[in-house]
Image (cartoon, rainbow, N blue to C red):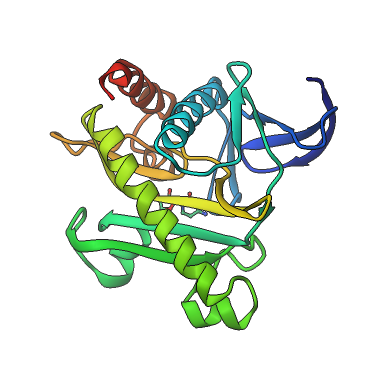
Amino acid sequence: MRKLKELKTGKAKRLYTTDDPEVLWVEYLDQATALNGKRKEQIATKGALNNQIDSLLFDYLIANGVPTDFIRQVSATEQLIHPVKMIPLEVVVRNLASGSFQRKFATDYLQPLKQPIVELFYKSDELDDPFMNDDQVTALGIASAVELVQIKQLALQINQLLIARFAQGQLTLVDFKIEVGYLNGQLVLADEISPDSCRLVDTTTQESLDKDVFRKHTGDLTTVYREVLTRLQNSEVAH
Ligand code: C5P
């Protein structure tokens, strides 16, 4: 397998073609962004930490029956994936109140929710990823009503699996964002799952162990991402 030409550079990853049209090469970058890319910093080892956490979680989800675009990790900072026809949605699942939900409804931080919530956002940097309700998604032809049911089911299945996996490392999954698309006609989980796209707190102390430390300037990003990776690796034998 050879890395060929650069296809696209996003906020945290660079995508390359390979000599196989069914395979893309992903490189995780040492870059952290906030405020939709308006704040940008180089952070050494961030790419390797996210690639390792993401690869470990995707291997776990695949082993538990979740369809994904992931093939395998190929180096500390790189992995192989299948090309996917992406649906331009950010699918957020929440278990406890935080972030934009906490601000919108003036809840307490980490207030328990009676059930997990799925929220949909239109993936658009120009529009700052606006919230969308189901009717807006179907009316704009982004996904059909039937597809929306499948997307939410997949998101909630992933939520249950991730809650259990993180709990093994004494981590509470507050919320997370996924992206989905189609691979050979099947709806699959795509993009990444890492502390960039999840909120995690220590189950006992409620210490933040995710990108919130970078967003809010409350801690060192690499220290907390390394802590998440170590806890996941140390609890890997347990499942
Ligand atoms: O900011 P908000 O509370 O809506 O974020 C919910 C979850 O989605 C958080 O875990 C956050 O890290 C993630 N997210 C993301 N990318 C975005 C927006 C939110 O990964 N563009």
Residue extending farthest left: 204
- Residue 59, percent across and down? 47, 29
Q: Is residue 118 above or below residue 154?
A: below
Quadrant in the picture for residue 99: bottom left
- Residue 133, percent across and down? 47, 77
Q: Is residue 130 above or below residue 59?
A: below
Left or right of 207 on screen, residue 139: right
Q: Who's the residue at 60% across and 49% down the image?
A: 37
Q: Is residue 91 above or below residue 60?
A: below
Q: Who's the residue at 28% across and 20% down the image?
A: 235
> Count of labels shown?
0
Which residue occupies the foreground of this view, 191 or 20? 20
Q: Is residue 175 visible?
A: no
Which residue occupies the foreground of this view, 44 or 232? 232
Q: Is residue 146 visible?
A: yes
Give the quarter of the figure containing the C terminus: top left
Quadrant in the picture for residue 77: top right
Left or right of 67 on screen, residue 238: left
- Residue 120, percent across and down? 47, 66
Left or right of 11 on screen, residue 53: left
- Residue 27, percent across and down? 67, 28
Quadrant in the picture for residue 6: top right
